[in-house]
Amino acid sequence: MTLSRSYRNSAANAFLLISVVAACGSSDAADSTTHDSNAGTIGTTGGSHQGGSGGFAGAVHATAGRGGTPSVGGNNTTGGTHSMSGSSAAGGAITTDAGSVADGGNLTLPVDLGRAGDFVILAKTGISTVPTSAITGDIGVSPAAATYITQFSLIADPSNVFSTSAQITGKVYAATYASPTPSLLTTAVSDMELAYTDAAGRAPNVTELGAGDIGGMTLTPGVYQWSTGLLIPANVTLSGSATSVWIFQIAGDLTLSSATNLSLAGGALAKNVFWEVAGAVSLGTTSHCEGIVLTQTAITLETGASVNGRLLAQTAVNIDSSTVVEPAQ
């Protein structure tokens, strides 16, 4: 019996369609059994044949999972190879909160304070106050003795491991207290010095901003460096997210003028702000500072000055009816 041309063509097309579907099904099945849909480069939704390299899913999983290379679509689906957030959607090389895209430069990691981060005030040669100050957190001196913690009216604990003060919501530690305090303080002071070196060694994103005067500015995250001192004569805002990091490298002194406020915006946290100062730090009357102060010399808070952060000095810390509160973690 002779088949009509249209029937022969329809049969051939049907056979071809069945063959293609079988081939695609085979590849998709292989993908399903050999690749985790949330972890691999090729996934169950896309497969290597569903839509081709420029179709809906392409050669890469349509939703990219947690470790795939692009974040949405295939090689050419919605925005090219990387359509939303760089190398990966969650946890890859670049992310909007912690990576270099958000902060506009190289990835900036917080400075590791080690055991120095256990103290709101830590000094090597002494801590003094003009009462009445209000401190939230532990304070410590080493290698100086407890006698170099002055005007706090210390009350020794029976263990002689620490003391307390009505001006401090926390404990007071000194190198001359009972074990294990001396060794713990030695470690904390060493970690403070290492943290200073770490902060000083970061590659800067911005140098000599404002020629050493940043009054009135709003600063985005990054590493800022000055070869001189830094003056803040008017209010300054640090604007970023909860994972943004600022490191200020200051070769001279840091001076915050009286009644001047340094504030945070956009969810930025004081624990991620680091002031690395080679010279002295002076916070004027009723001024306010945010962040971790790491200095090679002394820190002085004038009457009514306040800090949300930590004061870590390689010499002394002197405060005058001041408020110092350790930063939220």
Image (cartoon, helix red, strand yellow):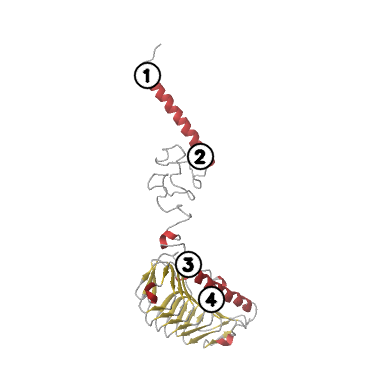
Question: Marks 2 and 3, how far apart in space?
Answer: 44 Å
Residue drawn at point x = 39 percent, y = 76 percent:
212
Residue 10 position (above or below residue 315): above
Q: Residues within 10 Å of mark 3 (few under 14, many from 20)?
A: some
Residue drawn at point x = 52 percent, y = 37 percent:
30
Q: Position of residue 276 (x, y in %)?
A: 48, 74
Question: Marks 4 and 1, how far apart in space?
Answer: 87 Å
Disc 4, SS: loop
Viewer-side residue, 322 vs 127 = 127
Closer to the observer: label 2 or label 4? 2
Q: Where residue 31 is drawn, which disc sits there?
A: 2
Which badge, 4 or 1, is on the more N-terminal residue? 1
Quarter residue 8 falls in: top left
Label 4–label 1 contact, CB within 8 A: no
Disc 2, SS: helix
Which badge, 3 or 4, is on the more N-terminal residue? 4
Left/right placement of residue 322 relative to residue 157 reads left
Disc 1, SS: helix
Quarter residue 257 falls in: bottom left
Disc 1: which residue = 7
Which badge, 3 or 1, is on the more N-terminal residue? 1
Residue occupying the far top of the picture: 1
Disc 4: which residue = 119
Q: Position of residue 323 (x, y in %)?
A: 45, 80
Closer to the observer: label 2 or label 3? 3
Closer to the observer: label 4 or label 1? 1
Quadrant in which the N terminus is drawn? top left
Q: Position of residue 248 (x, y in %)?
A: 45, 72
Closer to the observer: label 3 or label 1? 3
Residue drawn at point x = 45 percent, y = 31 percent:
21
Q: Where residue 203 is drawn, which disc sits there?
A: 3
